[in-house]
Image (tube, rainbow, N blue to C red):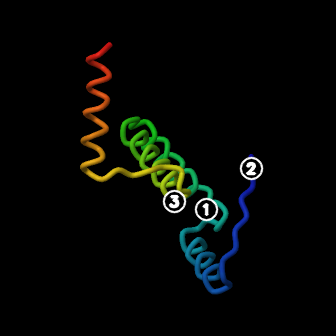
Amino acid sequence: METIHFRIDAQTKQLAMQAAKRQQTDLTKLMRERAEQLAAEELEYQSNTHAYWLETQINEAIQRYESQQTHLFDADQSQQKMQQLRRQLTEK
């Protein structure tokens, strides 16, 4: 089993430990349960392949744009490019 470490401020830690004690458990167990819930939610999300695929495509496009690896066309340029591609397809 893997170990996760994270930092929180003292007051948050103290309050979380008090909440865990009130629930008759410990903070580690509560954090493990929450991590398992998050993993199950992510697994369910990823099983909806279209939504996962679409989000991945959008994030990759944004990264390419931000790193200036892509070029955007305005509407006129886009129309011209599409006409050119149609011509090429009909010529073959």
Up the image or down, 37 lies above or below 11; here it is: above
Q: Which residue occupies 41% across, 35% down?
A: 49
**Pointer 2 with pointer 3, Cβ within 8 A:** no
Residue ranking furthest to the bottom: 11
Residue 79, image x, y percentages: 24, 42
Which residue is more in the foreground, 77 or 48? 77
Tell me the distance, in whole angstroms, between the alpha carbons under discs 3 and 1: 35 Å
Q: Which residue has dot 1 on it?
A: 31
Q: Identify the residue under disc 2.
A: 2
Task: Give the x, y percent position of residue 6.
Answer: 70, 68
Q: Amino acid at mark 3?
A: Glu
Q: Residue at x 25, y 50 (%)?
A: 75
Helix, strand or loop at disc 1?
Answer: helix
Callout 1, which amino acid?
A: Met
The residue most toward the top is 92
Which of labels 3 and 1 is toward the front? 3
